[in-house]
């Protein structure tokens, strides 16, 4: 049985009680882990994460699937906890819906015909930029209601990760089966792209500062390989910046669908935003990366989640997150 975020959410409720049994848990063997995961619905799944990331291993230690294998617990482990070396929980990894951002990048913006991991099934990635904010709990509630995972592209510093309440939101995202990726530290176009030209040193510095923020807010062993440029990848002189990020083990991710909440022409209703997001997803679409925003008081986007998910499920999509 394939594990869903709903089973992950249920295990959050159990985790408080399990912590009171911590002393007993330490005496359990590795085999008890399999029993615990089975009770929470965490059966092994299969993803298309076949390739490693040498650049990530050289810079940040083991990453992606390799980190997951190296970090297997030796005693009973809370399945909703961060899996060391990753940006998601043990349960998300066991569920089989975590995909390498390098693969997702290649599927949409690389040489997909040459990709050995190009999926035969339909996969949708719900992505939310600019958080955490007061909208985050509402987004999480809708994702739980619809039993789907998402990737949250967060901002560092006082605009995001360091904001009051943000560490709790980030931990809630991971505990609920979602993943956390990086969307810069300042989100300042003038710093990142002076004269509309990408500045590699500034971009890498913001990646490093945000990663440090996340390790302090979430866990010292947090790591991610997924980056989204503020404003997208449409600036001038992007190749040097891409190369600099790749040397850090990072892959950039844009989108091929959006609900319009980052534009001046955004609908003021959830149904309108859902319609816009779905307008570019056809019956022959294999991979969908949908851009939405987790900015303050963004109620129409919260309302758009259910109609988007229902339609995608009817089209035969499964849902994934990026590492």
Image (cartoon, rainbow, N blue to C red):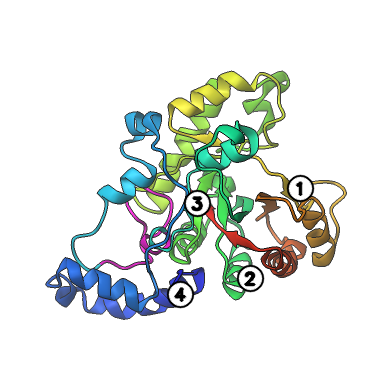
> Hey, which quadrant is residue 143 in on the image?
bottom right
The answer to the question of whether label 4 and label 3 lie on touching residues, with beta carbons closer than 8 A, is: no
**Separation of marks 2 and 4 at Cα, in angstroms:** 15 Å
Q: Are marks 1 and 4 in contact (CB under 8 Å)?
A: no
Was residue 88 drawn as part of the magenta stretch in this picture?
yes
Q: Which residues are magenta?
A: 77-92
Give me the disc on residue 180. Answer: 3
- Residue name at image x 27 percent, y 66 percent: 77
Q: Which residue is mark 1?
A: 262
Is residue 302 at all visible to an observer of this figure? yes
Q: CA distance from mark 2 to mark 1?
A: 20 Å
Q: Which residue is mark 2?
A: 142
- Badge 2 crowding class, 10 Å Cα cut-off, few under 14, some 14 to 19, many 20 or more, is some
Tell me which numbered mark, 2 or 1, is placed earlier along the sequence.
2
| Side (left or right) of 196 relative to 248 | right
Q: Main secondary structure of the magenta part?
A: loop
The CA distance from mark 3 to mark 1 is 20 Å
Secondary structure at badge 2 equals helix
Along the horizontal axis of the image, is 239 left or right of 1? right
Residue closer to the observer: 14 or 40: 40
Q: Earlier in the sequence, mark 4 or mark 3?
A: 4
Residue 245, given in percent of the width and then of the height, sits at 50, 28
Asked if labels 1 and 2 touch by Cβ distance under 8 angstroms, the answer is no
Q: Is residue 60 magenta?
A: no
Q: Earlier in the sequence, mark 2 or mark 4?
A: 4
Give x and y (percent) for residue 218.
Answer: 40, 54
Query: Between 23 and 319, which is closer to the camera in this rendering?
Result: 319
Alpha carbons under labels 1 and 4: distance apart = 32 Å
Residue found 78% across the figure and 57% down from its top: 278
């Amino acid at each position: 049985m394939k594990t869903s975020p709903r089973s992950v959410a249920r295990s959050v409720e159990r985790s408080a009680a399990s912590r009171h049994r911590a002393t007993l848990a330490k005496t359990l063997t590795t085999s008890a882990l399999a029993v615990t995961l089975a009770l929470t619905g965490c059966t092994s799944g299969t993803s298309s994460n076949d390739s490693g990331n040498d650049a990530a291993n050289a810079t940040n230690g083991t990453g992606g699937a390799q980190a997951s294998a190296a970090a297997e617990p030796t005693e009973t482990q809370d399945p909703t906890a961060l899996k060391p070396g990753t940006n998601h929980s043990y349960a998300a990894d066991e569920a089989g819906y975590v995909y390498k951002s390098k693969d997702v990048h290649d599927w949409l913006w690389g040489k997909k015909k040459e990709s050995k991991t190009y999926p035969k099934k339909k996969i949708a990635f719900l992505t939310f930029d600019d958080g955490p904010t007061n909208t985050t709990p509402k987004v999480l509630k809708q994702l739980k209601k619809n039993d789907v995972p998402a990737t949250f592209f967060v901002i560092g510093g006082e605009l995001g990760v360091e904001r009051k309440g943000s560490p709790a939101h980030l931990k809630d995202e991971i505990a609920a089966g979602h993943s956390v990726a990086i969307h810069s530290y300042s989100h300042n176009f003038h710093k990142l792209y002076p004269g509309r030209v990408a500045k590699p040193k500034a971009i890498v510095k913001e990646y490093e500062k945000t990663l440090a923020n996340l390790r302090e807010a979430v866990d010292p062993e947090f790591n991610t390989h997924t980056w989204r440029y503020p404003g997208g990848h449409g600036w001038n002189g992007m190749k040097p910046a891409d190369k600099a990020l790749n040397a850090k083990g990072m892959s950039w991710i844009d989108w091929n669908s959006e609900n319009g909440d980052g534009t001046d022409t955004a609908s003021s209703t959830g149904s309108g935003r859902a319609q816009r997001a779905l307008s570019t997803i056809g019956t022959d679409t294999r991979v969908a990366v949908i851009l939405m925003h987790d900015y303050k008081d963004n109620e129409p986007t919260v309302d758009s989640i259910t109609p988007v998910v229902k339609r995608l499920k009817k089209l035969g999509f499964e849902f994934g997150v990026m590492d």
